Image (cartoon, rainbow, N blue to C red):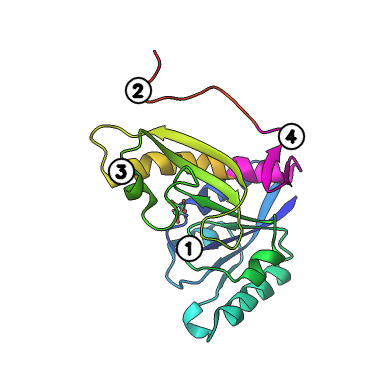
Amino acid sequence: MLRVAVLLSGRGSNLQALIDACRDPDFPATIVSVISNNPHAQGLARAQKAGIATTVVNHRSYESRETFDAAITNDLDEARAELVCLAGFMRILTKRFVNRWRNRLLNIHPSLLPSFKGLDAQQQALDAGVKLAGCSVHFVRSGLDDGPIIAQAAVPVLDNDDVKALSTRILALEHSLYPRVVRLIAEGRVAVVNERAIIDGKLHSSSSMSNPSQD
Ligand code: GRF
């Protein structure tokens, strides 16, 4: 069982997807800690309901990013976490933290990276007029939403989409993609070679997707 910690700041629907995945006795990972910088995050209640230990590390109580990150590291060490999943965690982590967790720190972002990094990725996609949007799970490096991409999933952008409709469509994919990636990592099937994430020794391909569709 891979010991997973989840860092979040808000709603926690991706945490919920991971909690639900972990209920399957065949799932090779378990969530050992949920840490939030926001004491009011809905994700904390989700964790508590599932009987998972929670910690609030409120950034406002720390005088620097370094001491804030050190407090998180403390909790991760105590929980003996082996993999850290950012799931709507709205703080920038220090280089030191990111390096310590190199290739053991994941993020999910609601765009097909490297497009539309940062906030309001779905609105950025609408503003750019792209025909396909989606989400990405990647290993974290010190740049914003940067690092080897492990998996991506795409959805069409529809003619009358607003940000809510598009975000909902992407979020549904996030909830299946994140647990799938955690499973792959727990099964030891993901490696980073030359800053590329490879699964089962190859860069995967499957059927193509286009919008408008080809048929
Ligand atoms: C998701 O869209 C995720 O991709 C982004 O922040 C959002 C978090 O949603 N990083 P939730 O808190 O998991 O519901």
Give the residue at x 60% y 82%: 67
Q: Quadrant of the C terminus?
A: top left
Q: Residue furthest left?
A: 160
N-terminal of the two: label 1 or label 3? 1
Q: Residue furthest front?
A: 194
Q: Which residue is mark 1?
A: 45
For badge 2, the amino acid type reads Pro
Crowd tier of the residue under label 2, counting other residues whose Cα lies within 10 Å: few below 14, some 14–19, many 20 or above: few
Q: Nearer the viewer, mark 1 or mark 3?
A: 3
Residue 206: give x, y in percent of width and height. 58, 24
Q: Which residue is mark 3?
A: 126
Crowd tier of the residue under label 1, counting other residues whose Cα lies within 10 Å: few below 14, some 14–19, many 20 or above: some
Q: Which mark is residue 109?
A: none
Give the residue at x 57% y 50%: 19
Residue bounds of the magenta highlight: 179-203
Give the residue at x 26% y 38%: 161
Q: Which mark is residue 212?
A: 2
